[in-house]
């Protein structure tokens, strides 16, 4: 088996395994050099730093995350799709901090995630350093002024028990102690360039316990144009429309380019299969923004960003033209009406059909389409339209199926949803993912 790492020399022949420990500093798109190629069927391993808060308080970042350098997949061409099976996902951070954000006026042009500046010396994307702990700890290396474009309006610090998969928020005294060891306890990878959010030590709700249920908030394929990594979606991406900085786009340009890798969908976790569109040659698979836990909607705007280790396998699906991700969720994550019938239920259905003369009973399997938009209504319409287009079904039939044999669920406010429905296996076979659905759900 051929295996390389992101520090290896340039490879031209596909390898069976590749490890990535290098990151893109906030931008994902065609300008980013790709690693690989990784063979179709190959295994990708990655260590990732925390997503949102660290890059947000680090002024040199031009996006809200720190994701892996993209990987070229052998044989993946524009108009195909790639299926990513998450084999293993593990949190490595010992502690983290998060909460509700506030922008600091005067420290950004149009979008504080993308176009940060120092209001004291005027330097755009200045180098910075951590001096002490607390809200004013992030300092401009040009002039020494406090420089973060973000504040907590309400925040917390959480520590983790990895053996028992539980987290607990701590009080201010403990938070201050943790802040003194911020990078160490965040377990920032060697080549990560973000400041650890633990340095801010905001601890407003001590003593809250929550089970760990880790997932990846940003995973997928490279968009067709350079975008801030946190804006590769339609809701965060709205801030790029007509923006005054270099990444400003029109709505049409955003919709054509995005692959919706940033979806904060809490069922994108160990065991799932994520099928992503290919919009640049080689696909450019990337990942990051691991969360230790998050409820549907990510209501606070941010959750528990952590460093972590991920292992996944890739498979090219030739000719599957999709605009956004298709997710094969774990069985326990599926909405109840979209779960495949068990043997006893199938027996009762056959008896019911015989009683009324309905001999033909559909053989089907569950699929979930990710939709995004500026709000939940737009996101739902987007997900439904994507399902109709990919499956070749009338839009109204998708509405009916999602109603009686599926569900609409919020992934993230303000505008990312899951559209799940049971679909005939003959259709899933025709579009090239029937074998994945059968394998995933033992159909």
Image (tube, helix red, strand yellow):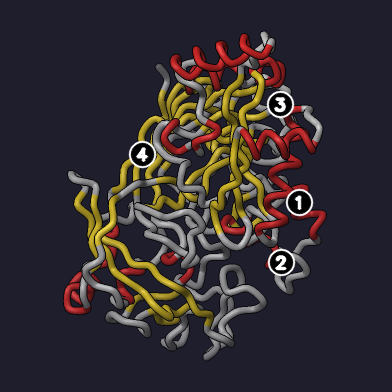
How far apart marks 2 and 1 lie (CA) works out to: 17 Å
Secondary structure found at label 3: loop
Q: Who comes first in sequence, dot 4 or dot 1? A: 4
Q: State whether residue 394 is above or below residue 75.
A: below
Residue 344 on image: x %, y %:
44, 16
The quarter holding residue 88 reads: top left
For disc 2, the marked residue is 246
How far apart marks 2 and 3 lie (CA) works out to: 32 Å
| Cβ–Cβ under 8 Å for marks 2 and 1 | no
Q: State whether residue 264 is above or below residue 121.
A: above
Residue 403 on image: x %, y %:
65, 39
Mark 4 surroundings within 10 Å by alpha-carbon count, few (fewer than 14), some (14 through 19), many (20 or more) = many
Q: Is residue 1 visible?
A: yes
Q: Who comes first in sequence, dot 3 or dot 1? A: 1
Taking 258 as reference, is 89 left or right?
left
Secondary structure found at label 2: loop
Q: Who comes first in sequence, dot 2 or dot 4? A: 4
How far apart marks 4 and 1 lie (CA) works out to: 30 Å
How far apart marks 2 and 4 lie (CA) works out to: 35 Å
The quarter holding residue 351 reads: top right
* Closer to the camera in the image, 187 or 191: 187
How far apart marks 4 and 3 lie (CA) works out to: 27 Å
| Cβ–Cβ under 8 Å for marks 3 and 1 | no
Q: Residue at x 36, y 69 (%)?
A: 197
For disc 3, the marked residue is 320
Q: Who comes first in sequence, dot 2 or dot 1? A: 2
From the viewer's perspective, is the residue at label 2 or at label 3 nearer? 3
Q: Is residue 191 visible?
A: no
| Cβ–Cβ under 8 Å for marks 4 and 3 | no
Residue 178 on image: x %, y %:
21, 69
Residue 23 on image: x %, y %:
48, 50
For disc 4, the marked residue is 89
């Amino acid at each position: 088996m051929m295996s390389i790492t992101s520090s290896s020399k340039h490879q031209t022949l596909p390898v069976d395994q590749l490890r990535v420990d290098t990151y893109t500093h906030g931008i994902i798109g065609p300008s980013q050099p790709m690693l690989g190629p990784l063979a179709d069927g190959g295994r990708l391993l990655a260590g990732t730093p925390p997503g949102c808060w660290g890059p947000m308080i680090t002024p040199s970042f031009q996006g809200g995350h720190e994701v892996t350098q993209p990987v070229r997949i052998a044989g993946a061409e524009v108009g195909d799709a790639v299926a990513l099976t998450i084999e293993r996902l593990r949190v490595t951070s010992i502690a983290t901090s998060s909460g509700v954000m506030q922008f600091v006026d005067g420290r950004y042009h149009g979008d504080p995630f993308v176009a940060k500046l120092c209001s004291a010396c005027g330097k755009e994307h200045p180098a910075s350093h951590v001096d002490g702990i607390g809200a004013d700890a992030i300092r401009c290396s040009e002039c020494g002024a406090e420089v973060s474009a973000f504040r907590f309006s309400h925040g917390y610090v959480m520590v983790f028990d990895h053996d028992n998969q539980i987290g607990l928020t701590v009080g201010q005294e403990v938070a201050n102690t943790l802040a003194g060891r911020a990078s160490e306890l965040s377990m920032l990878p060697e080549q990560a360039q973000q400041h650890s959010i633990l340095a801010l030590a905001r601890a407003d709700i001590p003593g809250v316990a929550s089970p760990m249920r880790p997932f990846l908030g940003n995973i997928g394929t490279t968009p067709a144009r350079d975008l801030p990594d946190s804006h590769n979606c339609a809701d965060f991406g709205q801030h790029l429309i007509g923006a005054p900085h270099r990444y400003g786009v029109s709505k049409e340009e955003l919709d054509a380019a995005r692959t919706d890798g940033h979806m904060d969908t809490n069922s994108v976790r160990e065991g799932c299969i994520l099928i992503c569109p290919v919009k640049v040659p080689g696909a450019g698979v990337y990942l990051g923004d691991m969360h230790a836990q998050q409820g549907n909607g990510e209501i606070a705007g941010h959750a528990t960003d952590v460093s972590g280790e991920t292992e996944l396998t890739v498979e090219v699906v030739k000719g599957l033209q999709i605009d956004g991700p298709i997710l094969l969720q774990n069985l326990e994550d599926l909405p109840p009406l979209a779960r495949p019938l068990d043997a006893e239920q199938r027996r009762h259905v056959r008896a019911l059909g015989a009683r009324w003369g309905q001999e033909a009973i559909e053989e089907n399997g569950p699929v979930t389409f990710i939709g995004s938009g500026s709000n939940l209504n737009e996101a739902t319409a987007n997900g439904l339209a994507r399902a109709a287009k990919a499956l070749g079904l009338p839009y109204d039939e998708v509405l009916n199926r999602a109603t009686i044999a599926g569900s609409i669920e919020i992934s993230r406010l303000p505008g990312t949803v899951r559209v799940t429905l049971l679909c005939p296996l003959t259709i899933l076979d025709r579009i090239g993912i029937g074998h994945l659905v059968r394998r995933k759900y033992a159909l």
